[in-house]
Image (cartoon, grey):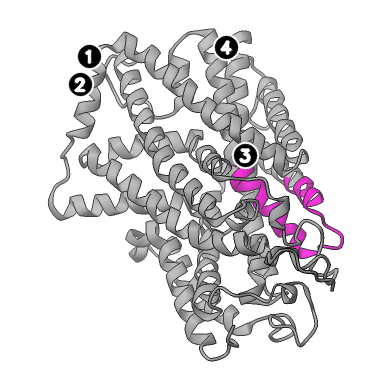
Amino acid sequence: MTTHVDDGDPAATVSAGDPALFNADLAPLPRSRRSWGWFEIFNVWSNDIQSLAGYTLAASLFITAGISGWWVFAAVLLAGLIIKVLCDLAGRPSVKYGVPYPVLARASMGVHGAQFPAVVRAVVAIFWYGAQTYFASTAVALALNAVLGTPGGLFLGMTWVDWVSYVVASALQIYLFLGGIEKIAGFLNIVGPAVYVVMIALLVAIWSRAGSDLVDAVGSVFSNSEVTGFAAVGAFVSVVGTMVAYFAAVVINFGDFARNVRTDSAMRLGNTTGLIISLALFTFLSVFITAGAYIVYQGGQGEPLTNPAEIVGQADNVWLTIVAAITLLLATLGINVVANFIPPAYSLSNVNPARISFRTAGIITGAAGFVIGALWVSTISRIGLPTFVDTLGAVLAPLYGIIVADYYLLRRSHLVLADLYTTRPEGTYWFDRGWNLRAIGAFALAAVFSVATVWVVALAPLAGFAWIIGALLGGLFHSLAMRGRVPAA
């Protein structure tokens, strides 16, 4: 173990550790080597929001919730505020100490016990990485089909254009990842604002054709009152829960991004602008574009289209299709790198730091995700993958509560940084041969309830809040189990 002091920066006090727990990618990142400010965090969230799934979800909530659009909008913003608070809490220790999520988890779970939840998080992310890579490839196929027509000949449910598109989307992500965290940040800084420019341009094009009918269509959405009374309250709560669940995957490993930020205030500003302002802008644009497309392309008949790819397909304009396809591709690549590539790279590296670097773990993620995405149409989408992944996500939820409760309530925001990288039995986080069995017990007990909301029909109304409830129970059980057993800071 090598330590030194650098201007009082805790992250600069450890430069080596036990090979079983330490490599250059998992090491604390000193502030002198951090280059992110609030704008990079803002764009992390912008890219997380700006996806095909994000657009469809936002538009669908306004159409199907059955309550006034203003209440839906308020619910969306409330969900953004909740996620912001959760991420502020999760990110602060990583800003202070410069460590990624798998290392931070060692403080509560034990230096070896943290590997289990890290691997589960990696599995969830790899499955969604493969699925999102497939969806990103559909944007490439949209552009190619606009030029070439729709070819025949299927292999594993996809045409040759689909396969070429899939390989292109996969290669772009690997290229982006291999450039390192700085190239990823630069990509997000460009794509985040660019997507909004294209969305506004699309809205202007639709609005110029729809005229005042667009305002009337949007007004009908915001004056909707199909559901009233207590049912309206339930609908409002349901929208909040749905949006929280949508962003929850990034919350637990938010430290992977926060460790690159110079100051806590910059992180909090990035979370505020990205999760509230950016979310509000994207939601409004989604509603206006969907309403405009309903008037212009559907003649006000049938169900409104909520998939942006389908809306673009209705335009019958090759150049618009190509530009929109590129935009959708970049937006989906952005969320995939943020939510589904970086987390498993750190988590897999944590399993065996001496042999698996961040770069090697990224290649493993890309290879496994490629197979999953390639089999998405023919096999995986038909075997109940969402339930499987939701179950894994429910298992992860209590870990957030355990980490936050352990850091803030039990350790009073203080860590012995060097002991996060040592296997010495006298280390603070060694516990029982590297495993904190009390934390594992709290984790398992809280996870039972989280998983039950996915599988038990009687608990289905709570499914939208399974993550939050699981996190609260995890923090509560851990605090009770560890009371009086954590040395004073």
For mark 3, what is the residue?
376
Image quadrant occupied by the N terminus: bottom right
Q: Which residue is mark 4?
A: 146
Foreground: 98 or 362? 98
Horizontally, is 115 left or right of 383 in the view? right
Would you say the residues marked 4 and 2 are in contact, meaning their CB atoms lie under 8 Å apart? Answer: no
Q: What residue lies at 38% left-to-right and 52% top-to-bottom?
A: 81
Label 3 with label 4: CB-CB less than 8 Å: no
Residue at numbered disc 1? 212
From the image, state whether disc 3 or disc 1 is nearer to you.
Answer: 1
- Residue located 28% across and 42% down the image: 72
Q: Could you tell me the amino acid type at mark 2?
A: Asp
C-alpha span from label 3 to label 2: 40 Å
Residue 308 image label: none
Nearest to N terminus: mark 3 or mark 1: 1
Q: Residue at x 44, y 17 (%)?
A: 201
Q: Secondary structure at mark 3?
A: loop
Q: Nearer the viewer, mark 3 or mark 2?
A: 2
The extreme left residue here reads: 229
Q: Is residue 230 visible?
A: yes
Assess whether mark 1 and mark 2 are in contact (beta carbons under 8 angstroms): yes
Residue 304 x/y as whole percent = 32, 26
- Taking 46 as reference, is 189 left or right? right
User: Which image quarter is the C terminus in?
Assistant: bottom right
Which amino acid lies under the numbered mark 4 shown in the image of this protein?
Ala
The region drawn magenta spans 336-365
Quarter of the rendering containing residue 356 = bottom right
